[in-house]
Image (cartoon, rainbow, N blue to C red):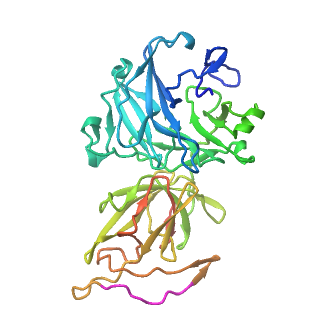
Amino acid sequence: MVRNTLAIEDGYDPSTASIRFYWRRRNEKAQSFMAEKKDQWLWPLHGARIGDRLVLFYCVVGPDHTPDSLGFKVQGSTAFLVDNPDAEPDHWHLRELAVPKNSWNITLGVAALQRDELLYLFAFDEPKHDVYLARLPATIAASGDLSQLEWWCGEMGHNWRKQDELRQAPASIIKSGSTELSVHFDPLAKRFVEVQSRGFGASTIAKRSSAELTGPWSSLEDIYTPPESKQREPFVYAGKAHPELTGDDLIVTYAANGSEKRLTEDMSIYFPRFVRASFAQPELVRILTPVSIPKDTKIRIGLDCDVNSKTSVDADEFSARTEEEITVDGSLVLPVGTPILGRVLCQQDPQHMRRRAISLVFDKIILSDGRQIPLVANLVARGGKVHALRGFEDISLVASTPPLPILAGKLISDCGSKPHVRKKAKEVETPIRQSSLVVSDWPRDCIGLIADEKNTVDLRAGDQVKIELTKDLQINPK
């Protein structure tokens, strides 16, 4: 079986360009361009042209015979240096490079991006597919030496650290990313853009962005649904952007696969698909008269960063963006992507040291004209749970409201009152029980997410939650 091929496109506009594919032949049989090693084979990741050298990264894959598996598993990565990339690929001088191994199940080279004098390499882990960031001097990478890798370890981990200094895995920059993605810099938006397939099988192509490679990254936004995702037994994956190509705001590609039977019968699949992507400029909403978004309005938002009961500390700042339009009397007031700023509150239960409460306090919303408006809102909870949407997965978090202030030096414990049911807009809401976790400086009626021996608060960048205004949001003309 041919496990990998190579292609070169002549021209930058896919609608007029031509493409040539390359593979090896042995005994009149087609062979992979990069040869297999015993029971391991290589799948292409990404690469970078550095001067007159080309560095290519490949995923090392082996069989997986465990039940319900896809039949393969990732076993690391390797890389090749080409010192004559302008020659025909059949005549390339290839030298395999030593990619530093790690014990974290992190595979290096899913995307590569050269910025100034540095080559940034993106990586993913198994099985979560969180995304990590490494870097090294571009000239050293072009020499074939990858041993000087530095990993982003987060501000709490002293930023960048050499791999041989690490005693644990580096910090991820994106949670629940992908094993195939692209990252590029958009000079018009002045932001980095990550493109990937979202979901499995019937996937979409989605993007997110960040002002810095290290994040925080925005939540995923779907930009295209491949028609193959709507067909029977869909298997669509490998969404990536190609900023070097022309023809629209962005050219993206993806792969459409199928069962072995379909592969032998349907010659229309397993070829790269090219898609033109056009992006409307962010809408500037002009407020001409005073507008009030009423109390109790629910807004779906996507988090730009992680909030975790094990790593977040009191007063940590976070950001989010609206995932839906908010209109008043038929007029758009808050477009999709409106930024929200807030902070994290953390409290330890003095009676149970392993029990902790985390709350998201929403402070400001940033209008499209740049103004920051005070925001008073709370997480939406039902039946003692806050629900977050992570891709197609529903994440349920235990929630509690805070108690009354401390009285006579004693914490007021669970009130034990019977919950009542209130119907509103065809939605049944059950007020959640009060807890002894929070002391007097906790905002009254602010919902806390509970972490203990059995529950962890683990909200990730890209997760979507609902908030509810607890006070009218008043917006006046500028």
Q: If the image is split into quadrants, where does the N terminus sit? A: top right
Q: Residue placed farthest to the left in the image? A: 409
Closer-to-camera residue (233/49): 233
* Magenta region: 412-421
Which residue is at 72% across, 43% downward? 227
**Residue 378 x, y percent position in the rendering:** 46, 70
- On screen, residue 124 above or below 60: below
For residue 454, what is the image quadrant? bottom left
- On screen, residue 309 above or below 62: below
**Residue 312 x, y percent position in the rendering:** 33, 59
For residue 297, what is the image quadrant? bottom right
Which residue is at 43% across, 81% downward? 433
Which residue is at 51% across, 36% downward? 62
- Is residue 299 shown to the viewer in this render? yes
- On screen, residue 122 above or below 314: above
Which residue is at 65% across, 28% downward? 247
For residue 286, what is the image quadrant? bottom right
